[in-house]
Amino acid sequence: MDATVAEQQDADRRLLRMVAAGDQSALEELYVRHGPALLSYADGLLSDRHRAEEALQDTLLAVWRGAASFEHRSTVRTWLFGICRRQALRRLADRGPVHLPIDAAADLAAGEPGPEAVTLARADARAVAGAMAGLAPIHREVLDLTFGAGLTHDETAAVLEVPVGTVKSRLFHARAALARALSGDPGDDSVATRRRAGRGGTR
């Protein structure tokens, strides 16, 4: 493990122990360290900045109340993203049922897509952000965690509560879908296609 990463993880654990002891400034420091990434992740799940900010506030409240329950089975960062995900999904549930597409190839080994990798490498940030907005939630989420938040495959698997192989497969399909959107060929992952499917159209 990189020394800098280990130092960051040690600092997170120290801050969380301080939060458990009632140190509010330690919670504020955790917010400074992880708040922007958590907010971006919640916003990606909810597509609603205001509700994402509410989810982040509830995440911080849950951390304040439950810091002592941290069992060191994951990194503090992974634990924070797991809490944030539950808070965001609770808000999605308030809107009614949310049907995420099933990853049919979840257990398949996924390699690096060739042409898709070239397309992604050439795209600018604004184009990627626009294309991300049109992806299926299950694909947008895995990209938000691995690229937006910088979580490892193991950490992403812990947040999503799925095997690492499933993360790799979803990431493979998400990158391919993103590349198709950037190249003007949205394919089955596009919003328009999902809407047609919801009206009884074929895929």
Image (spheres, rainbow, N blue to C red):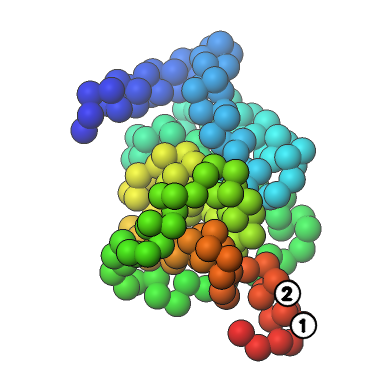
How far is the residue under mark 1 from the one under mark 2? 6 Å
Q: Label 1: state its secondary structure.
A: loop
Q: Amino acid at mark 1?
A: Arg
Name the residue carrying label 2.
Answer: 195
* Amino acid type, callout 2: Arg
Is residue 112 in sight in this rendering?
yes
- Give the side of residue 59 with respect to residue 177, left or right: right
Q: Which residue is mark 1?
A: 199
Q: Quadrant of the N terminus?
A: top left
Can see residue 138? no
From this view, report whether residue 156 is shown above or below residue 137.
above
Residue at 37% from the left image edge and 19% from the top image edge: 11
Q: Position of residue 33 (x, y in %)?
A: 49, 23
Q: Mark 1 Cα within 10 Å, few/some/many (few <14, many 20+)? A: few
Which residue: 53% across, 53% down? 141
What residue appears at the point 60 percent right and 39 percent down from the top-left corner? 40
Image spot of residue 105 (x, y percent):
40, 75
On screen, residue 85 above or below 103: above
Location of residue 21 with respect to 146 vertically, above or below:
above
Given residues 47 and 53, the one toward you in this image is: 47
